[in-house]
Image: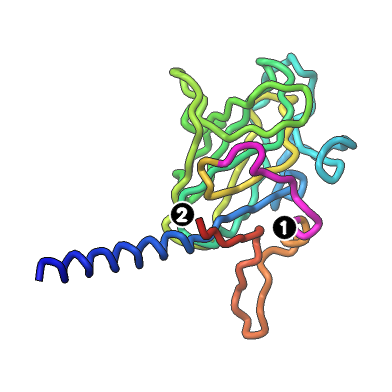
Amino acid sequence: MKHGTILTLMILTVFLSGIVELRAEVEIALEAELANEIVEPMVIADDKNASDGKFIWMEGAPATGGGGVGYAEFIINIPQPDTYALWGHVIAWDGNSDSFWVTWQPADPNEDPQKTQNTEFRWGVAAGAAWHWDRINHWLDGGTFDREWKFKAAGETVLRIGVREDATMIDAIFVTNNLKANEGDLRLPTDKDRKIQTEGLAVDAKGKAATTWGSLKQAYE
C-alpha cells in the first residue's frame, strides 16, 4: 500500500508539472502613439529613430522639470490570469526629465497619482539620450524596485501613463508574464501588433472574442 501511494504521488506530480509547462508566455507590444486616449499636454511627436517614427511626451526642454498633467491610456486585453511586468522604450535626458506616473487597473486601485503624489505609482525612468528599454518600477524614497501586476482573470485592463516631468519620452510598451525577462527578450511592435492595437480584439464567425491582442507563444520548458 505504501508503494502504491508513492507511485500515485509521483504520477500526480508529473501531471501537475505538465500543466505548468503548458503555460502560455504572453508578449504584447504596443505603440505609445496608438494609445486609446492621449490627453494634452501629452502629445505625439516625430523621431525617425523611434518605432514607426513616432513617440509621445509632454514637450519641453530637458532640464525644466514640471509636468504633472496629461496622460496616455491604453486598453490592454490580458489573455490569461497571471502576474505581468511592463517595459517602456524610452528616452530620459537628465534628472529633471526622467519620470512618469503609472497605474494599471484593476490590479492597481482607482487612484490618480498626479493628484495624490503616491510614490507607489512613480516610475523612475533610467537615464539615456538614445532609445532604450527600461522596466517600469516603483521609485520609492528607499530606492527603485521593479513592479509586478497580478490579474485574477483574463480580459480588459486599463494602463495609464501620466506625465510627471516634461521631456520624458516613451516610444513603445512591452507587456510580458515572463518576470525574468531582460532586454534581449523584448521587441518593438510589428505591423501585425499595430493592426491589432488599432482594431482591438478580433471577433470570430460566432461573434465570440478571440484572443488576438498581442503575440502568444507556448512555453514547453
Q: Give the vertical position of 172 relative to 157 (above or below).
A: above
Q: Which residues are magenta?
A: 181-193
User: In front: mark 2 or mark 1?
Assistant: 2
Marks 2 and 1, the one that precedes in the sequence: 2
Horizontal side of residue 192 vs 201, given as left or right: right
Q: How many marks?
A: 2
- The type of residue carrying mark 1 is Gln
Disc number for residue 153? none
Counting from the top left corner in percent of width and height, residue 211 is at 61, 68
- Give the residue at mark 2: 82
Judging depth in this view, the residue of 25 and 38 nearest the camera is 25
Tell me, yes or no, whether the highlighted magenta stretch contains residue 31.
no
User: CA–CA distance between discs 2 and 1?
Assistant: 21 Å
- The type of residue carrying mark 2 is Asp
Mark 1 lies on a secondary structure that is: helix
Instruction: Judge the density around disc 1: few (<14), some (14-19), many (≥20) Cα neighbours within 10 Å.
Output: many
* Residue 199 falls in image quadrant: bottom right
Counting from the top left corner in percent of width and height, residue 220 is at 52, 60
Mark 2 lies on a secondary structure that is: strand
Which residue is depicted at the point 72% across and 31% down? 132
Horizontal side of residue 186 vs 194, given as left or right: left
